[in-house]
Image (cartoon, grey):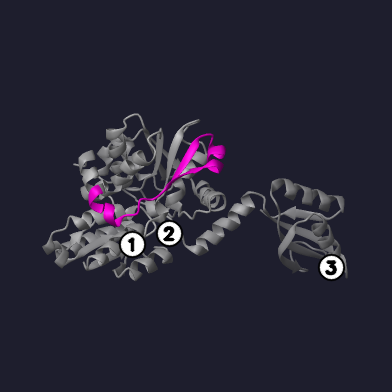
Amino acid sequence: MVTVQSIAAAATRIGPSIYESPLVHSRTLSRLTGNTIFLKLENLQMTGSFKERGALNRILMMTDEERRRGAIAASAGNHAQGVAYHAAQRNIPVQIWMPRSTPLVKLSATRNHGADVVLYGENYDEACRAAMDRSQERQATFIHPFDDDEVIAGQGSLGLELLRQNPTLEVIVVPVGGGGLIGGVGCAVKERASKVEVVGVQTARLPSMTAALRNSVPVELPAGPTLADGIAVRKAGSRTLPLVQRYVDQMVTVDEDEIAAAILTLLEGEKTVAEGAGAVALAALLQSKTGHRGKNIAVLVSGGNLDVNLLARIIERGMVRDGRRLRLRVLLPDYPGSLEGLTSVIAKASANIVETSYNRAHYGVGLNEAALDVTMETRGRDHASELLAALTGSRYEFSVIE
């Protein structure tokens, strides 16, 4: 059983090797959400996420004989890095099983920490089952990413840390996958400060803990892609579910666009990089999913291992959604100077052209016409509306490409 005493012991055990991440107040996010927001920046840990807390606590509890035989773990990335890094620091051989869809940034980091990486399966659950079988074959210690008492206790050290850093907290919002983090944090917080609300947030693509709460037993959900790959767990833990039932006040879900918007908000407003799973807690507050107003709220930014290619796509889609990137198809007469006239109108409206495509044969154009697809940067929706009005006033025929 996980208790506040076992969590406190874990906090003492891992303390010398774990960074006490800052809890910082955000004026911007407070204004946007109507609450007083504090960000717990676990993305600043050595391996980029909170996962190393639980991984290290489990490693430190291994016997000399277990260390000689080595450890095996399964992970979509963050747990893998935590196990690989802290095992390497103690000369413990470790093998990590990861799904083939693991983002390259997490795969490369795990290998760089010295782990033997095996890519297997289409999702975490398939990789986990295979890793558990291999650990039994080798008599190696299997370090579960969430359904292990020592791992849960290590994650729970975050809860004690939060209460120490800010005793005035009224709500703590936590990302949820298999339930190890929220189970440990919930136990630590509720046993020390029972009036503090603990809220869990899952991706709507894989709400495994929400389903477990509804059915009073873990159930396996169909696999599905999500930006929040770090919490893409198809089945909640059997050891974490009772903790969530006892200590968590509310569970909510967020969709993919809401997660992407939160990532972009953290990047632009806080200069903080968060992966999808690390941004779901903020996403819930930005979308008013928890129903809180005027509260002191800690938001866990649980990880920052975000692939740069994915980040580029998130930024571009976010600009489109906010009206800061506008794409038009403009019908032009096909004679010298017509393009110059169009660009003159755009320049006078202070929009910036970033891409063009000129076509004389498609989109229903006449023999003496051309269609120009032009992508522009604007300052936002109001500026985009001014640009469209200027084009209309100059009698250009155009359509917005969504």
Looking at the image, which is closer to me, 45 or 352? 45
Q: Is residue 95 above or below residue 53?
A: below
* Residue 198 located left or right of residue 32: left
Q: Is residue 177 left or right of residue 350?
A: left
> As shown in the figure, which amino acid type bears the numbered disc 2?
Asn
The spot of residue 231 in percent (x, y) is 38, 51
Residue at screen point 73% across, 62% down: 353
Write the start and end of the magenta stretch as one range: 12-40
Q: Which mark is residue 367?
A: 3
Q: Secondary structure at mark 3?
A: loop
Front-lying residue, 393 or 361:
393
Instruction: Report if residue 39 lies within the magenta region.
Output: yes
Give the quadrant of the N terminus.
top left
CB under 8 Å between discs 3 and 2: no
Rate crowding at label 1 as few (under 14), some (14 to 19) or many (20 or more) other CA atoms within 10 Å: many
Query: Residue 382 lies in what quarter of the image?
Result: top right
